[in-house]
């Protein structure tokens, strides 16, 4: 768990319509030191992002009810909140990097419990490095 100190208390928004899968993902991330906010739909996720400015990562399933899937959600988040790290998952679809917005990463289900933790940490560090370099230039 000592690996998260340099990231601060990173906030991960987990978007998954299956309650048990969402709860498992949240538990995995919380055990590794992340603060987790949960949403069952893309619409609910966007409402959370409108209110919370501290979200640093999005971990979303692709296949969700409600008119907007996880890839569409990731595209909106990348456009409106480019500082947020994007991780997309699915047990049905397989998505190449060329279909993901920004520097998003795809993880297929079922995944090892360490996979989302590792990828989210890497992406948050990457985003922080880019932000630091951009801040130093201006």
Image (tube, rainbow, N blue to C red):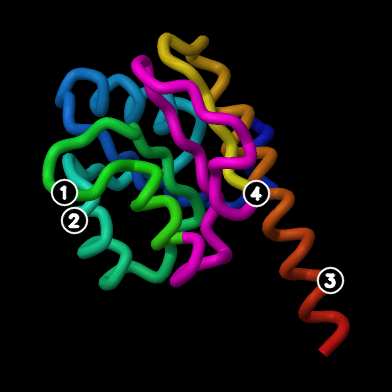
Q: Name the quadrant containing residue 19.
A: top left
Q: Residue at x 35, y 17 (%)?
A: 92
The reply to whether dot 2 and dot 1 touch (C-beta < 8 Å) is yes
Residue 125 - label: none
Residue beneath label 2, please? 43
Q: Name the quadrant containing residue 62.
A: top left
Q: Which residues are magenta?
A: 78-102
Q: Residues within 10 Å of mark 3 (few under 14, many from 20)?
A: few
Name the residue at the right extreme: 137
Q: Is residue 39 magenta?
A: no
In this rendering, the answer to whether 56 lies above or below 35 is below
Residue 67 - label: 1
4 or 2: tag closer to the N-terminus:
2
Residue beneath label 4, please? 103
Q: Residue at x 85, y 80 (%)?
A: 136
3 or 4: tag closer to the N-terminus:
4
Q: CA distance from mark 3 to mark 4?
A: 17 Å
Percent x, y of residue 45: 25, 54
Q: Secondary structure at mark 1?
A: loop
Q: Is residue 77 left or right of residue 49?
A: right
Query: In the image, which is nearer the foreground, mark 3 or mark 4?
Result: 4
Residue beneath label 3, please? 133
2 or 1: tag closer to the N-terminus:
2
Percent x, y of residue 112: 51, 10
Q: CA distance from mark 4 to mark 2?
A: 22 Å
């Amino acid at each position: 768990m000592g690996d998260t100190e340099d990231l601060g208390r990173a906030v991960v928004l987990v978007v998954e319509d299956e309650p048990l899968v969402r709860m498992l993902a949240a538990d995995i991330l919380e055990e590794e030191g992340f603060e987790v906010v949960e949403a069952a739909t893309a619409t609910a996720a966007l409402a959370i992002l409108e209110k919370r400015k501290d979200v640093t990562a999005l971990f979303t399933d692709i296949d969700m009810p409600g008119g907007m899937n996880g890839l569409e959600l990731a595209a909106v988040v990348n456009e409106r909140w480019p500082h947020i790290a994007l991780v997309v998952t699915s047990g049905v679809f397989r998505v190449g990097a060329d279909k993901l917005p920004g520097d998003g990463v795809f993880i297929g289900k079922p995944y090892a419990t360490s996979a989302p933790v590792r990828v989210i940490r890497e992406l948050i560090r990457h985003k922080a490095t880019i932000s630091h370099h951009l801040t130093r230039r201006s």
